[in-house]
Image (tube, helix red, strand yellow):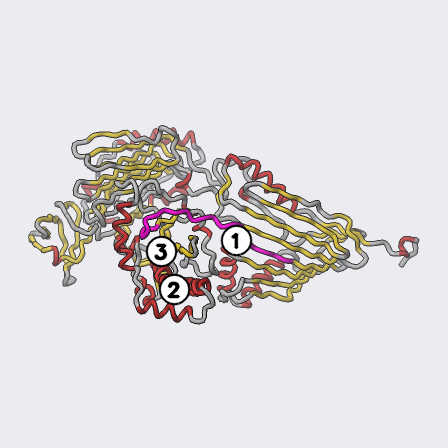
Amino acid sequence: MNKYHRFALLCILTILLTTVTGNTAVITKTDDSSIAAEQIEYADNALTILSGSETVRLSRSEIKNISFTAQKRTAEIFATDSADLAEIMPKALELLKKYPDAQSILVTEEGNYQHRKDGTCLSRYRCVTYLAQDESLWEAQISLSFDPNRETIKVLHARSYTPDGAVHTLSPDQIKISKGTSGSVNFDQYQDLSFTIPEAAVGGLIDYSYEVEEFNPFDRNLFQGRFYFQGSQPVGESVLRVSVPHDKPLYYVADNIASGSGEPVKTEAVESVIYTWKFTDLPPIISEPNMPAYRNIVPGVYYSLHKDFTYVHEKLRPMFAKRFQLTDMVKEKVEELIEGARDVHEKIARLYQFCQKEIRYISIKGNLASNQVGHPAEDTLKNRYGDCTDKGMLLATMLKQIGVEAYPVGVRTNDTGRAVREIAIFDDNHCITEVHLDGRIFYLDSTATDYRYPYFRSDDHETVADNTMLGTLKPVPLPPPEDNAVHITRKIELAADGTTRIDFESTQNGSSEASFRGSARNLKAEEYEKQIRAQVSALTADYVLELATHTEPLDFGTQFKARSIYLLNRFATKSGRYMIFAIPFFEMGFPEVSLEKRRYDIEYNTSRLRTDQVEIKIPDNFNVKYLPPALRIQSPYVEFEIIYDQQGESINIVRKLAFPRRIVPVADYQSFKMDLEKIAQSTKQKIFLEEAETEAASEGVKP
């Protein structure tokens, strides 16, 4: 579907233009002067340009840039035949009967992606949507991204079909082209083409179609892409067509498609073979807590000219080698950073921390090399900024200086779905560092800023690392729960009137520690105290905060700790001789099992562990009337234990909750739900104390 698929029609650096007409181009010369071209023809390493009544011929060496826009297209071109909208409307209304609560309905869409004999690529996309509710009107605002150095883009048509049967067509002067707004830390060559379909109305259709021509591919032997057929709205019909020349194979993966339904219809055309996939009447995806990424559950097709990564790795490996250089500047910085380190692990930790903290995240992309390989290690060190690829390259290069084998590797983070590795496509969205040391392989991620060695981001866990330099695909293991743990201790003193004094301390590691560090680092001491006060005041307005502190978040040599001490006046409930006490912040909830049934697996970012140790000193002259029973649960997906024990005048509670796996299959949902509900119920249990009768009271004498 248009909001989930992208064209990744990647190819190499040679301009080969056939005649281009009907779309104004701006030619920038090497002297920075420019020419507006109405027609371009390429031959014999030169461009023949028609500009008004003048014909200009430029050699390839005189050309700095070619930028195409769609703003000069004539209104007549936009007024294409719209007769089929009258036929599409009844189909939309039939779908509305089936899905009356839908905000919008994707009535029909068609994506066509063509790889030509000369290695250039052409794609066309059309989408017709029925607007069922006011909330869907935003869908009339269209924004398309393109690289003007490699691609032309033109809107074939854009129009609305209102409930009264009128057609309202977009005027070409309503199309805007601007520099892409990718954020303050991302810079690339892409531009945005945007427009708003006129007169879009609830109860009507919007219909737009556009074409992208990749005239200057990165590499003419690369052609790949992905297409998804389902999403959050109902789909009437979704069609994908991919065509390649007869002499080129097309490899594809059909994912989340019933057996036998993923094979395309193959059509022999004059110059190509066309592969067609078609799906109809697809229901909307209904969101569930902790559900997988859409690409893991919706029907999708991935395609490529290459069955494995051999060609891609061979293409990129020299680029990696060129940037993976241990220069004098890099060597000197490494030696400065590791001075006085006790062992190799302390050296790695210092380099890891430097790449996290001292190299700002800024992404600058322009071509295949910078997109997939990044910039030279020395450039990143000199600039003190870079994206994940640059940081991964720098850390790996710095590790080389201390004799540690390491490589930048690509992964697809687990929150965006599993990466396709069955065929060769660029499917990574992140880069981390693969370290080979003492016969084992482990991973570090210098993009995040608050991870203490050897921990790394949880969305990297249980992914597959693509190591171009070694030509390997390796699983990134899921760490044990102990590597992402929160350990909490509470020392509680109860007074006879129910006043409760709590001394709370927590330590963390892994992603939990990084989260606490990041939060503390961004708060002033008074802001942190205010945050703690807000939490405590939610228990009772009658409190005294005695302490709210934490260790230095920038000290990566020690585990991060937080401590707070607070007094809750008359907090425990008194009823006659009885005191009822619930431990503050002890309850647990699990929204991921709130549904009676699920359609999709539960997916967490990583494994995790939480332990609680509670010591409660009971007031003088009180006895324990009731302690909740112990509970133990052991399954492949959750491990839990809670034990209450009285020792003299104290109650000791030990609790442990671990999730050793990241994914809970829907087939095991009911048993998992039952286990978590038992755990949640156990955390709501209260302690009952009874005040001992005085001797005078037992004899019936008033005190």
Please report the bounds of the magenta region as a residue range: 467-489
Q: Reply above or below: 107 against 143.
A: above
Residue 172: where, in percent of width, then height? 23, 46
Which residue is located at x 69 percent, y 59 percent? 492
Task: Let me know if residue 701 is in the magenta part.
Answer: no
Q: How far apart are marks 1 and 3 (CA)?
A: 25 Å
- Looking at the rendered image, the quarter that the C terminus falls into is bottom right
Choose between 677 and 39: the one closer to the eye. Answer: 677
Q: Is residue 188 visible?
A: no
Name which quarter of the figure residue 403 lies in: bottom left
The answer to which image quadrant residue 157 occupies is: top left
Front: mark 2 or 1: 2
Dot 2: what SS? loop
Amino acid type, callout 2: Ile
Point out the tag, 3 or 2, that comes first from the N-terminus. 2
Q: Is residue 533 above or below residue 205?
A: below
Few, some or many residues within 10 Å of mark 2 (<14, 14–19, 20+): some
Residue 10 in the image: state x and y as whole percent: 25, 47
Residue at which label 2 appears: 402
Q: Pointers 2 and 1 in contact (CB under 8 A)? A: no
Q: What element carries label 3?
A: strand
Amino acid type of the residue tagged 3 in the rendering:
Tyr
- Vertical placement of 272 versus 218: above or below? above
Q: Report the disc number at residue 407.
A: 3
Point out the residue furthest to the front here: 439
| Neighbours of disc 1 within 10 Å: few (<14), some (14-19), many (20+) | many
Instruction: Name the mark on residue 484.
Output: 1
- Say whether residue 348 is left or right of residue 31: right
Whole-angstrom CA distance, mark 2 to mark 1, is 28 Å
